[in-house]
DNA sequence: GTATTATTGCAATAAAATCGCAATAAACAT
DNA sequence: ATGTTTATTGCGATTTTATTGCAATAATAC
């Protein structure tokens, strides 16, 4: 499936690129200048995830949040699986540069992680 | 708010006590012998969470899963924040006896964690 | 320009969880 | 045992989040 460039795709991608935080569908829709249909936003986001451009975080509120997958200049510093922080005060989710470290029992194979720490962020404390 | 004992409460609690896995609302409803209303099950579960008897895990599927809070005989061994494992093959979630370890930037205060590792469990691999 | 088909808009649908309210029943006092 | 209080339940409606079917649109290649 060859991807095509569209205004919608550009707009959503730019939002994510310029955001310091992970964005919910709702936040994206509100921040968009141009009017884009709900379903389209979801589809664009899911395509980004499929293509590995963006990763999805599911928070305790059951909502999906999206953030750009940052590639460091030094590939060794690329943090694949990292913690996320959800601030109850300002109601945001951000990617922490903190790797998720764990050990699992024998025979268990981990393919993905979804780790969210909840509390109060530096800005709000 | 003083709690009352009811057949519903007993039934749901026994299910959770005897389950090796965390249970979704759906799973609980199906496994119950007696017929209990959807909303009631949710309310019972939320009360358990408020009372610290049960903890809630939200998975990437956006659904809530519930598991008994196990108190070890040795209080030092009580694992407050632990990882959870979600098996894509048998579609279950279980509590791992693996503590969530992390460090957060200055000024960040963590109150809760919701950490789920996804992959294939030992039974299915 | 024309053809192909990825993408979009729209409305309908699905799925999970909560809420308002009247009816019920658990706990307690008499 | 009987009555009172109010926590709990059942029911339906509602909210919220996300997906889907389908026809219309538009990006890309020829
Ligand atoms: Mn992230
Ligand atoms: Mn657990
Ligand atoms: Zn904050
Ligand atoms: Zn399994």
Image (cartoon, coloured by chain):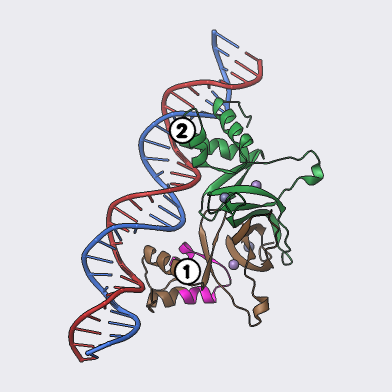
Chain colours: A green, B brown, C blue, D red
Q: Give the percent coordinates (x, y) of residue A17.
A: 63, 35
Secondary structure under tag 1 reads: helix
Q: Give the percent coordinates (x, y) of residue B122.
A: 69, 65
Q: Residue at position x 59%, y 54% from top?
A: A125
Q: Residues within 10 Å of mark 2 (few under 14, many from 20)?
A: few
Label 2 resides on the chain identified as A
The residue beneath circle 1 is B50
Label 1 resides on the chain identified as B
- Specify whether residue B43 is painted magenta: no
Ligand 4 is located in which of the four quadrants? bottom right
- Specify whether residue B23 is painted magenta: yes
The segment highlighted magenta reads: B13-29
Q: Give the percent coordinates (x, y) of residue A94.
A: 62, 47
Q: Residue at position x 54%, y 47% from top?
A: A64
Q: Residue at position x 51%, y 57% from top?
A: B63
- Mark 2–mark 1 Cα distance, whole angstroms, equals 38 Å
Establish whether labels 2 and 1 are both on one chain: no
Residue B124 horizontal side relative to residue C17, left or right: right
Q: From where the camera sits, is residue A55 visible?
A: yes
Residue B82 horizontal side relative to residue B64, left or right: right
The residue beneath circle 2 is A37
Identify the main secondary structure in magenta: helix
Which residue of the protein is positioned furthest toward the front in this rendering? Answer: A125
The quadrant in which the C terminus of chain B is found is bottom right
The answer to whether residue A50 is above or below residue A114 is above
Q: From where the camera sits, is residue B87 visible?
A: no
């Amino acid at each position: 499936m060859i991807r095509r460039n569209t205004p919608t795709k550009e707009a959503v991608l730019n939002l994510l690129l310029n955001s310091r935080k992970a964005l919910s569908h709702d936040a994206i829709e509100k921040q968009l200048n141009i009017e884009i249909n709900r379903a389209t936003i979801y589809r664009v986001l899911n395509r980004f995830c499929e293509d590995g451009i963006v990763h999805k975080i599911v928070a305790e509120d059951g909502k999906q949040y999206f953030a750009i997958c940052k590639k460091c200049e030094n590939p060794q510093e690329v943090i694949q699986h990292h913690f996320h922080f959800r601030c109850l005060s300002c109601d945001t989710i951000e990617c922490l540069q903190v790797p998720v470290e764990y050990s699992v029992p024998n025979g268990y194979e981990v393919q993905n992680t979804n780790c969210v720490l909840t509390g109060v962020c530096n800005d709000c404390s």
